[in-house]
Amino acid sequence: MDIEPGTLYLCATPIGNLEDITERVRETLGQVDLIAAEDTRNSMKLLTRFDIHVPMTSYHKFNQYDKAEELIGRLKEGKSIALISDAGTPGISDPGEVLVKRCVEEGVKVSALPGASAAITALILSGLPGGRFAFEGFLPREGKDRKTRIKELENEKRTIIIYEAPHRLRKTLKELFEVLGDRKIALCRELTKKHEEVLRMGLGAALDLYSEKEPKGEYVLVVEGYSGPAGDTADSAGMGLLTIAELMQHYMDKGLSKKEAMRAVALDRGVSRRDIYRELLEKDG
Ligand code: SAM
């Protein structure tokens, strides 16, 4: 693989199993001038495992603004830099976003080398609809922001993905249960590692379970979206791909009147009933 001077390479690294590194990432990490890592000590294990001896510098949330300027300076001098986070895809709930934004503003070339991300790994294991999903990352830790965010999830129809640390799991399960009710949840833990575990149950049962069981390891919570007044969700069978007319038919086949179906479709698509009416008239006319 040819490394281009003056380019920032966003390199996804494994989320547990080192075998999940991609060939491109491996080659790139071995060839760039500099690796910017969230935690250089942690990343040293990865580099040692693959016999990579490229200088590293730290790029983390406490230095991300100042360090971004320094890295851009080096990129502009023609150096190539790889950005890696502790695990997974840089920029997804870890530093990266700021640097990419600044590169875009400064006209510095950015190239992405995709790979593992805990969110997508958990989603596909959850057994919940994956056609449409809302990635929430970490919920705000406390206070009004946290309350507001959880409240916003009450009517979220898409499957919801949340990152959570073990010591905060119980609080999060409790608050989600209080607002969302007994929705389905998949608790995905230690993904791709030796003790990988995916528990699929109701939020209430999860709360009971973890009142006795000690949460351990890193979690991704995948929560069922809101089912809507029709007791069905457009997401449940990839219905987001249907046309308005097809979605109307889907609801009417389920026994809804035309008016009720229009209301359900409007809710699904996040538009007014008048918009749906107009769209159907245009199709008919
Ligand atoms: N950028 C990363 C990605 O693409 O997945 C996420 C980084 S974020 C700082 C770390 C969080 O990701 C953890 O708190 C946990 O919620 C989740 N996570 C990372 N690795 C995981 C794993 N192996 N199993 C379960 N969750 C994991």
Image (cartoon, rainbow, N blue to C red):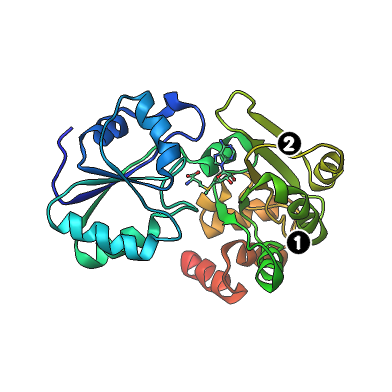
Q: Is residue 275 left or right of residue 61?
A: right
Write the residue at 79% across / 47% down. 203
Q: Residue 229 lies in what quarter of the image?
A: bottom right
User: Which amino acid type is marked by label 1?
Assistant: Pro
Q: Earlier in the sequence, mark 1 or mark 2?
A: 2
Measured as percent of width and height from the top left, residue 45 is found at 42, 30
In this view, the residue in front, 247 or 151, is 151
In this view, the residue in front, 150 or 49, is 49
Q: From the viewer's perspective, is residue 3 above or below residue 161? A: above
User: Which amino acid type is marked by label 2?
Assistant: Arg
Residue behind mark 1: 229
Measured as percent of width and height from the top left, residue 208 is found at 87, 43
Measured as percent of width and height from the top left, residue 169 is found at 72, 48
Q: Residues within 10 Å of mark 2 (few under 14, many from 20)?
A: some
Q: Residue 181 lies in what quarter of the image?
A: bottom right
Q: From the viewer's perspective, is residue 118 above or below residue 260? A: above
| Label 2: element kind | strand
Q: Is residue 137 left or right of residue 40?
A: right
Q: How crowded is mark 1: few (under 14 residues within 10 Å), some or many (20 or more)?
A: few
Residue behind mark 2: 200
Task: Name the quarter where the N terminus is drawn.
Answer: top left
Q: Nearer the viewer, mark 1 or mark 2?
A: 2
Write the residue at 36% across / 40% down. 114
Q: Quadrant of ligand 1?
A: top right
